[in-house]
Amino acid sequence: MMYGFKRKNRSSGPSGDGVLTLKSMTRIEAIKAADHRALPLDYDHKSILHSGEAVDRLNVILSEGFD
């Protein structure tokens, strides 16, 4: 499970990626479904989609699933 967690320096609202709250992204059901493997990344809701780090991590996850 990968999720973005980038909080603006001056933000006083709930923690999260700017769209979803951290609380909603890390529900216990989601963590359990991910076999307790969660990877928070320092990106907001949109920038994670263009992140080389996220792509690299996803490729590792996919390759592990097909070995």
Image (cartoon, helix red, strand yellow):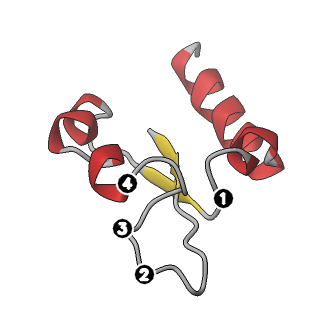
Q: CA distance from mark 4 to mark 3?
A: 6 Å
Q: Which residue is mark 2?
A: 12
Is 34 or 16 nearer to us in this picture?
16
The x, y position of residue 4, in whole percent, is: 55, 53
SS class, disc 1: loop
Q: Which residue is mark 1?
A: 43
Mark in front: 4 vs 2: 2
Mark 4: give few (<14), some (14-19) or many (20+) Cα within 10 Å: some
Rendered image: mark on residue 21: 4
Query: Does residue 24 sit above or below 14 in this rendering?
Result: above
The x, y position of residue 67, in whole percent, is: 58, 16
Q: CA distance from mark 4 to mark 2?
A: 13 Å
Precedes in sequence: disc 1 or disc 4: 4
SS class, disc 3: loop
Q: Residue furthest bottom?
A: 10
Q: Decide: marks 4, 3 in contact (CB < 8 A)? A: yes
- Residue 44 left/right relative to 20: right
SS class, disc 2: loop
Q: Decide: marks 3, 2 in contact (CB < 8 A)? A: no
The x, y position of residue 45, in whole percent, is: 61, 47
Q: Which residue is mark 3?
A: 14
Q: CA distance from mark 1 to mark 4?
A: 13 Å
Q: Decide: marks 1, 3 in contact (CB < 8 A)? A: no
Quarter of the image where one finds residue 36: top left
